[in-house]
Image (cartoon, grey):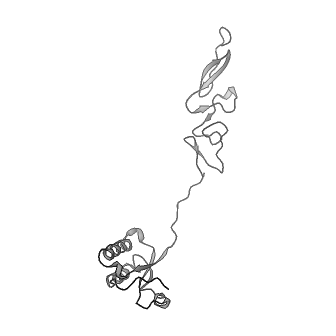
Amino acid sequence: CGKCGNKCPTGANGMPACFDGVCGFACTGDYQDCDKVASNGCEANLKTDPNNCGGCGKTCTDGGSCVNGACECAGVSAEAKLIPLDMYIMFDKSGSMQGANWNSATAALKQFIQSPQSAGMGVGLDFFPASSACSVMQYSTPTVPIGVLPGNAMALINAINATTPSGNTPTTP
């Protein structure tokens, strides 16, 4: 390279190369010579190096790691933990719910109540309208108080089965 008999040395993760009479090396695969130090060759793997992630000098911050040339958003993972949930359901039993509307809505609610995924949730239930004379006090005590599923499931299902649609849809209180 540059003169007869001048053979270019190899560098780590690179092939010997001659550019305009000057020895160097061409990096192979996902490697790059980011520090421009010939003695250590192509030292940076752009797919895994958090200081050269996807390109020389692109640093993953906050302890993130480099995966396939992209910084992960966090260097630490944690398992999600469920927190207790209480759900108070106000169920429309007005006359507009008669027939298919009532059958579909009650079937869906029963399915939710009995689902294994609902276990551990606190669920209570009341219906509206309570009567033709609508007052806040009529809704202060639920038909089924909040209780943890699946233990509260039978009380909820019995209340649904004992209720039929009637009355107008209240808009107050």
Number of numbered labels in the structure image: 0
Q: Quadrant of the N terminus?
A: top right
The image shows residue 158 at horizontal and vertical percentages of 34, 83
Q: Residue furthest top?
A: 4
The image shows residue 7 at horizontal and vertical percentages of 64, 14
113 sits to left or right of 2:
left
| Residue in front for this viewpoint, 44 or 129 | 129
Relative to 23, residue 108 above or below: below
| Residue in front for this viewpoint, 78 or 90 | 90
Give the image quarter of residue 49: top right
Q: Residue at x 46, y 82 (%)?
A: 171
142 sits to left or right of 56:
left
Q: Residue at x 59, y 32 (%)?
A: 31
| Residue in front for this viewpoint, 135 or 48 | 135
The image shows residue 120 at horizontal and vertical percentages of 45, 73
The image shows residue 134 at horizontal and vertical percentages of 45, 89
Relative to 2, residue 135 above or below: below
Give the image quarter of residue 126: bottom left
